[in-house]
Image (spheres, grey):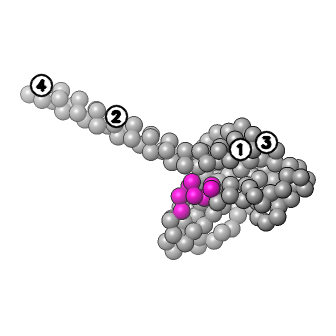
């Protein structure tokens, strides 16, 4: 009986350990879906990689939950953080959202420091002074997806170049 209890205890502890490892891997992979495409864009602009910031992620989660009610593509207007937002009527992955923002690169003209079309999402991603990012994704009540990433220090300072 004692060996059966010991065996059950070992199986239980092993199962809990594997569950914790899987959970940690899942959370890590989720963050990487934002960090990898962000840092690929930064590398192409010769900027150092950003690190994940839980304070920014908490802010992003709070705001994404607000937007989940109506799924409006509306900025939080935070005076402290830079911000990129994306909305889709269906599913949108973190990587797809970052790729949309980084895809604005051809619209930015370094020589004139102007955008031919929308490029502020791209310039925020590659902003020279930005060091960290935190993001969140929420399923909207209408079935859409809302994604937001916040950056610190913020970028897109008028009159300055991103890099």
Report helix, strand or loop for mark 4: helix
Label 2 sits on a secondary structure element that is: helix
Q: Are marks 2 and 1 in contact (CB under 8 Å)?
A: no
Q: CA distance from mark 3 to mark 1?
A: 16 Å
Name the outermost residue toward the top: 3
Q: x, y (%) of residue 114?
A: 86, 59
The span from disc 4 to disc 1 (Cα, nearest Å) is 61 Å
Q: Are marks 3 and 2 in contact (CB under 8 Å)?
A: no
Task: Give the labeled residue for mark 4.
Answer: 2
Q: Residue at x 49, y 71 (%)?
A: 143
Q: Which mark is residue 17?
A: 2
Q: Mark 3 and mark 2: span between their CA atoms?
A: 39 Å
Q: Residue at x 25, y 35 (%)?
A: 12
Q: CA distance from mark 2 to mark 1?
A: 39 Å
Q: Is disc 1 placed on a helix, strand or loop?
A: helix
Q: Position of residue 40 (x, y in %)?
A: 65, 44
Question: Residue 83 occupies which quadrant of the picture?
Answer: bottom right
> In this rendering, which labeled residue sits more in front, label 3 or label 2?
3
Q: Which residues are magenta?
A: 92-99
Q: Residue at x 28, y 37 (%)?
A: 15
Dot 3 corresponds to which residue?
129
First in sequence, mark 3 or 1: give its number: 1
Label 3 crowd bin: few (<14), some (14–19), many (20+), radius 10 Å: some
Please name the residue that numbered disc 1 is placed on.
Answer: 44
* Nearer mark to the viewer, of 2 and 1: 1
List x then y, in percent, for residue 1: 8, 28
Specify whether residue 143 is painted magenta: no
The mark nearer the N terminus, 3 or 2, is: 2
Mark 3 and mark 4: span between their CA atoms?
61 Å
Q: Quadrant of the C terminus?
A: top right
């Amino acid at each position: 009986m004692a060996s059966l209890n010991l065996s059950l205890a070992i199986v239980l502890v092993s199962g809990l350990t594997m569950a914790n490892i899987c959970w940690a891997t899942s959370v890590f992979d989720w963050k990487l879906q934002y960090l990898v495409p962000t840092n690929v864009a930064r590398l192409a602009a010769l900027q150092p990689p950003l690190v994940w910031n839980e304070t920014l992620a908490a802010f992003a989660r709070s705001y994404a939950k607000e937007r989940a009610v109506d799924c409006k593509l509306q900025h939080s207007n935070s005076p402290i953080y830079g911000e990129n937002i994306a909305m889709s009527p269906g599913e949108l992955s973190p990587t797809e959202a970052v790729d949309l923002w980084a895809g604005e690169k051809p619209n930015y003209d370094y020589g004139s420091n102007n955008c031919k079309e929308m490029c502020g999402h791209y310039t925020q991603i590659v902003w020279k002074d930005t060091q960290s990012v935190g993001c969140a994704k929420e399923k909207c009540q209408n079935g859409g997806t809302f994604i937001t990433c916040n950056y610190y220090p913020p970028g897109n300072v008028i009159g300055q170049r991103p890099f």
